């Protein structure tokens, strides 16, 4: 893990990608896997298989070797992002939690089981991609092309944070992500507000009004065809979120402010089962010292929308464009930046008890079974393209700080992930024997 974290495999720039692929290929070959490196129009996909081809059970797992960009000079980093530091139970460094510490724990479990017991009792297939942080664009085509090769009984992989106090969980789905850019234009040049204020179009104000129209003061998206209230929640999902505890004090301590929602059931419902609109960037006008009385000719906002349930990214984008047009925002162009559909596996899926027991054995405590990860992974390629049940078992701490300064994981969770992976192999072998 430390060796992997030292590789700055940033998919956005391509830095370190070749080194990361070489690292994984060498490790997988050394552990006895058959390994292929598939070139794509972006970063390579590493694919590996191990175990008897005629085994009675096949486990498909997934991870990503790319990381989010990190700047050592960025305010808040206490260590060099790509020089891992072990401090007690913590491992600090970019990618330690997202996702190197998670997929490597499961790969180490496979290698250790084989070292201890010889031939594996099941067939295992592994996909490791290098584009997750930039939208996983090559992955759907890879999965479609190799649909028959990827046949499996179940998908289990690790991503995302655990719950507070290192509470393990089974995540039965993920929210999708629609990345958008709103570009507002007005006059052909910047105008003096004394000469044109009140009579010239103001792209900055137009953009502010549109964004405010889309989301109410409670943070609920109100766009017809894409809104908060239009998403159906099943009784089992509502019951599941009501069982999840909320460490409100821990959340406040972690983010430094009281969250917008403080009731446990609503907190988790919003985080897992409702769409969420976030403005991630806004650029307009003059922000230097003093004042410039200028009506700027353009303004730009970037946003990401977390999608849930059966929401289709293309339909949501069409609804937003229709909403803007109907309200007269003709000067605002809405561009798609990335698109990942949401994904869901039933809480009542027959593989849940098997995975739940393996996680309980690996961690020494009973896991929660929850409807959804608040974040996004390309889970839809497994549930929608391959038609498989997919269960996510996070191995990173609640405060892993992925995509932020001081990203970390825990040594104890890494080792619990190894134990869980070994228990999964045993459980899958037992299931095959009982058929």
Image (spheres, rainbow, N blue to C red):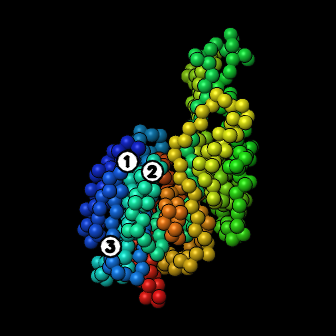
How far apart, in angstroms, are the residues tagged by discs 1 and 2? 8 Å
Label located before the other in sequence (3 or 1): 1
The numbered mark at residue 137 is: 2
- Name the image quarter holding the N terminus: bottom left
How far apart, in angstroms, are the residues tagged by discs 3 and 1? 26 Å
Q: Residue at x 27, y 56 (%)?
A: 22
Asked whether, in this view, residue 307 is left or right of residue 103, the answer is right
- The residue at which mark 3 appears reads as 50
Spot occupied by residue 116 in the image (x, y as percentages of width and height): 31, 81
Task: Mark 1 and mark 2 in contact? Answer it, CB < 8 Å.
Answer: yes
> Considering only vertical position in the picture, is 117 above or below 410?
below
Q: Quadrant of residue 321?
A: top right
How far apart, in angstroms, are the residues tagged by discs 3 and 2? 26 Å
Q: Residue at x 58, y 68 (%)?
A: 345
Q: Nearer the viewer, residue 176 or 381?
A: 381
The numbered mark at residue 25 is: none
Label located before the other in sequence (3 or 2): 3
Task: Mark 3 and mark 1 in contact? Answer it, CB < 8 Å.
Answer: no
Disc 2 crowd, CA 10 A, few/some/many (<14, 14-19, 20+): some
Asked whether, in this view, residue 425 is left or right of residue 53, the answer is right
Q: Quadrant of residue 3?
A: bottom left
- The residue at which mark 1 appears reads as 42
Spot occupied by residue 198 in the image (x, y as percentages of width and height): 73, 17
Spot occupied by residue 254 in the image (x, y as percentages of width and height): 58, 53
Circle 3 or circle 2, nearest the eye: 2
Dot 1: element: loop
């Amino acid at each position: 893990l430390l060796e992997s974290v030292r590789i700055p495999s940033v998919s956005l720039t391509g830095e370190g990608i070749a080194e990361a692929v070489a690292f994984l290929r060498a490790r997988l070959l050394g552990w006895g896997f058959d390994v292929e490196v598939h070139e794509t129009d972006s970063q390579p996909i590493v694919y590996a298989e191990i175990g008897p081809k005629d085994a009675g059970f096949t486990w498909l797992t997934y991870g990503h070797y790319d990381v989010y960009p990190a700047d050592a000079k960025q305010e808040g980093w206490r260590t060099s992002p790509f020089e891992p530091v072990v401090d007690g139970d913590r491992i600090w460094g970019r990618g330690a939690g997202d996702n190197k510490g998670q997929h490597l724990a499961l790969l180490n479990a496979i290698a250790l089981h084989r070292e201890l017991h010889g031939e594996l009792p099941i067939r295992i297939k592994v996909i490791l991609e290098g584009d997750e942080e930039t939208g996983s664009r090559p992955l759907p085509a890879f999965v479609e092309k190799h649909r028959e090769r990827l046949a499996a009984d179940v998908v289990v992989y690790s991503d995302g944070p655990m719950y507070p106090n290192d509470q393990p969980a089974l995540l039965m789905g993920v929210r999708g992500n629609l990345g958008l850019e709103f570009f507002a234009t007005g006059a052909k040049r910047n105008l003096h507000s004394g000469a044109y204020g009140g009579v010239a179009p103001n792209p900055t104000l137009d953009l502010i009004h549109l964004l405010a129209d889309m989301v109410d003061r409670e943070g609920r998206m109100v766009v017809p065809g894409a809104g908060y209230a239009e998403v159906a929640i099943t009784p089992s999902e509502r019951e599941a979120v009501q069982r999840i505890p909320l460490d409100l004090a821990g959340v406040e301590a972690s983010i430094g402010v009281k969250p917008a929602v403080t009731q446990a059931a609503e907190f988790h419902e919003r985080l897992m089962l409702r769409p969420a609109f976030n403005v991630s960037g806004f650029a307009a006008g003059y922000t230097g010292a003093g004042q410039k009385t200028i009506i700027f000719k353009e303004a730009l906002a970037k946003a990401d929308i977390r999608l849930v349930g059966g929401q289709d990214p293309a339909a949501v984008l069409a609804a937003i464009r229709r909403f803007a047009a109907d309200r007269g925002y003709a000067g605002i162009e809405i561009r798609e930046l990335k698109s990942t559909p949401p994904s869901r596996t039933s809480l009542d899926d027959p593989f849940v008890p098997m995975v739940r027991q393996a996680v309980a054995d690996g961690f020494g405590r009973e896991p929660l079974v929850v409807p959804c990860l608040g974040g996004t992974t390309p889970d839809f390629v497994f549930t929608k393209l391959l038609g498989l049940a997919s269960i996510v078992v996070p191995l990173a701490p609640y405060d892993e700080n992925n995509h932020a300064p001081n990203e970390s994981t825990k040594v104890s969770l890494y080792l619990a992930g190894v134990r869980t992976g070994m228990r999964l192999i045993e459980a899958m072998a037992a299931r095959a024997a009982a058929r």
